[in-house]
Image (cartoon, rainbow, N blue to C red):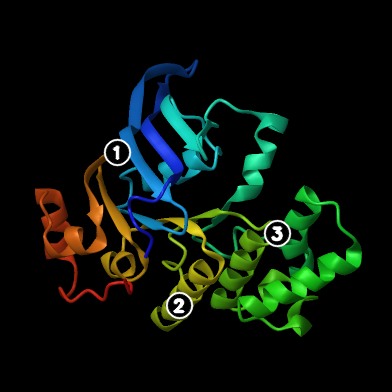
Amino acid sequence: MSGATSPALLEVGHVTKHYPMRGGVFGRARGEVHAVDDVSFAIAEGETLGLVGESGCGKSTIGKTVLRLVEPTAGTIEWRGQRIDALHGRAMRPYRRELQAVFQDPYASLNPRMRAADIVAEPIRNFEDVSASEIRDRVVSLFERVGLRSDQMPRYPYEFSGGQRQRLGIARALAPRPKLIVCDEPVSALDVSVQAQVLRLLEEIRTRLELAMLFITHDLRVAAQVCDQVAVMQAGRIVEHGSAEEVFLRPQHEYTRALFAAAPGRNFNFAPA
């Protein structure tokens, strides 16, 4: 695990995201939905922070805000000490290469009209000026790294199983050589046995490549298995934040204790220190 004293790669400071509620014939604003309220955290290089909480608590909104897929209403997002929360277009492009994502639904997040090789090659073409032969070599290497075969490269997403599609999504995220990956419920749509395989793959990749991860999940066991730090979210706010061992073995907030009480079993297997 990475030490908490390591320099921050990503810093989220007092981020808030409100969505207008509209109604009536003219669609006028009639209030706001407070999806995220005053959320702050930091992730060091090679570290995994888990955002844990029930559906609708704002976890995915935070992930989208970090990726700049949605604009924060207030607050700051710093990447390597540089603010990126107000960047747009070409100014944001260098950071998009370093910030990648693995999404919950491995089928919906892949273009069904593209072959697997092109799905993985696309980020390389977007961010680098390299030859076609080098791109192919890197795609072959990425397929092997995530446990797929090179003879599967010409296939379309529908020709893969759910677990294989998620491996394909991971290969695509790794293609531009990022420094941080936002994993938004990456195993919740998979069977339990496949979940374990994908989690082992993510942990192996993180260790080998020294990647940082923002790991979004509602599953406490998954968080205990892969996360160094855990932040528990309730109704758009972080109510508890600490090391996985501290939060899971000595929860301080009543909401955290309620989550554990509702979880099946109480024996959590922590990621190796």
Residue behind mark 3: 111
Q: Earlier in the sequence, mark 2 or mark 3?
A: 3
- Towards the viewer: 10 or 39: 10
- The location of residue 141, given as percent across then percent down, is 72, 75
Residue 15 position by quadrant? top left
Relative to 124, say whether 201 is above or below.
Answer: below
Relative to 143, say whether 224 is above or below.
Answer: above
For numbered disc 1, what is the local secondary structure?
loop
Mark number for residue 200?
2
Relative to 97, say whether 71 is above or below.
Answer: above
Residue behind mark 1: 236
Q: Earlier in the sequence, mark 1 or mark 2?
A: 2
Note whether residue 25 is visible: yes
Q: Quadrant of the N terminus?
A: bottom left
Neighbour tally class for label 2: few under 14, some 14-19, many 20 plus, Cα within 10 Å = some
Of circles 1 and 2, which is in front?
2
Q: Mark 2 to mark 3: distance in Å?
A: 25 Å
Note whether residue 53 is visible: no
For numbered disc 3, what is the local secondary structure?
loop
Relative to 94, say whether 272 is above or below.
Answer: below
- The location of residue 117, given as percent across then percent down, is 77, 69
Q: Amino acid at mark 1?
A: Gly
Mark number for residue 47?
none
